[in-house]
Amino acid sequence: MKLAKLQKLMRDLYYHRDEERGPDKTFLWLVSEIGELATSIRKEDNPEQVAEEFADVLAWTASLANLLNIDLEQAITSKYPGKCPKCNSIPCRCVF
């Protein structure tokens, strides 16, 4: 599924709830889902469980972006134009 399609699906399914909840509380849900993903990874749960947690993180990210009128596909394409945004290399050659 393309990122734009995911974002539209989340808008169609949940925007009415997300709008009532608002960006701050929606962000808290996203953080909670990130915590669940971290727990799942640390416990080395089965791959299906980890995949579900990744899906939840992406879904809540899309929901929050919808509330803030951010086009995720455009944002990611702009920030990462096919190369590292700092060193302009593939793979990244930045020194950390």
Image (spheres, rainbow, N blue to C red):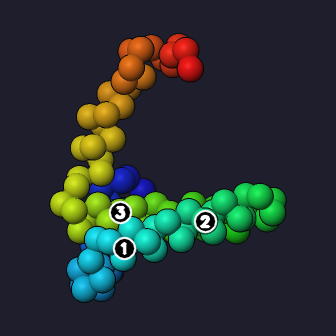
In this rendering, the answer to whether 92 lies above or below 1 is: above
Please give the label number shown on residue 62.
3
Give SS at disc 3: helix
Look at label 2 and name its amino acid: Gly
In the rendering, at what x and y percent does residue 18 appear?
30, 79
Upstream in sequence: badge 2 or badge 1:
1
First reached walking from the N terminus: tag 3 or tag 1: 1
Can you tell which quarter of the image residue 5 is in?
A: bottom left
Residue 63 in picture, x, y percent from top left: 33, 68
User: In screen coordinates, is 40 left or right of 23?
Assistant: right
The residue under label 3 is which amino acid type? Ala
User: Marks 2 and 1, Cα distance to the nearest angstrom?
Assistant: 14 Å
- Answer with left or right where residue 32 lies relative to residue 72: right
Q: Which residue is mark 1?
A: 26
**Image depth: mark 3 or mark 1 in front:** 1
Q: Position of residue 20 (x, y in %)?
A: 25, 86
Calculate the distance from the C-alpha at mark 3 to the C-alpha at mark 1: 10 Å
Which corner quadrant of the image does residue 37 belong to?
Answer: bottom right
The answer to whether one can see residue 83 in this image is no
Find out whether the residues at labels 3 and 1 contact each other: C-beta distance under 8 Å.
no
Q: Residues within 10 Å of mark 1 (few under 14, many from 20)?
A: many
